[in-house]
Image (cartoon, rainbow, N blue to C red):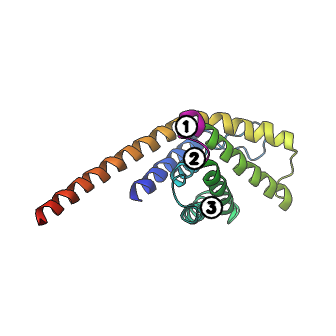
Amino acid sequence: MMMEAMFIGVSLILDMILTVLFPFDFAMIRPVFIPCVGFCALMLTLRGKPLLDSLFIAFVAGLVFDFLNADHFMLSSLTCMACAFLSHIWSKHIGSSLLELIILLCSTIFIKELLIYFYMTASGSAVMSVMTWLSKRLALTLAGNLIPMLAVIWMNDLRQTIQVRRESVRRKGEKLRWEQLK
């Protein structure tokens, strides 16, 4: 669990660095890039967990996202939970190849942005057409997150490899202790 928290934390730091490098245009005059590295790390981490655990972790991580962004309270929590639920369902039907993971992460980013768009238009916080949203926000967000997605998938594989090695060393140590008791 600690490795997973560190993985998501490093991804959130990368999110913050990308946010500083590509500032947000609130006037929506030019296309906007929203880094989703921490969100992708969260979705990859929740893939192998039971449904209730993944929903709870997504809710807590969404609260952290809400506090970091200082945006609409509970919006990230609800979108993270919805995306975690969909990711949990989809993960049963896909493997862990690079292409499948990229499609999964792009789909969850699309769903997250779609839910945020629906909330913003329903609440009257933002008035923009679907085409404006697609061209100014979603297109660059999806395209810009492809390279960081590859880094997140690589870091996730590295994290899983380290966890498997630690687990095998721990199990090997348990086996030796059991044989000493004989």
Quarter where residue 139 is shown: top right
Amino acid type of the residue tagged 2 in the rendering: Cys
Q: Residues within 10 Å of mark 2 (few under 14, many from 20)?
A: many
Kindly report which numbered mark, 1 or 3, lies closer to the viewer in this rendering: 1
Q: In the figure, 5 relative to 133: above or below?
A: below
Element under label 2?
Answer: helix
Q: Which mark is residue 66?
A: 3
**Residue contact at pointers 2 and 1, CB within 8 angstroms:** yes
Cα–Cα gap, marks 1 and 3: 21 Å
Q: Residue at x 57, y 40 (%)?
A: 101
Q: What is the distance, in whole Å, between disc 3 and disc 2 at their CAs?
A: 16 Å
Q: Is residue 135 visible?
A: yes
Seen at 39% across and 58% down, the residue is 2
| Residue 166 percent coordinates (x, y) | 30, 51
For label 3, count other residues whose C-alpha is less than 10 Å away and answer few (under 14), some (14-19) or many (20+).
Answer: some
Closer to the N terminus: mark 1 or mark 3? 3
Which residue corresponds to mark 2?
40
The stretch of residues the image draws in magenta is 93-101
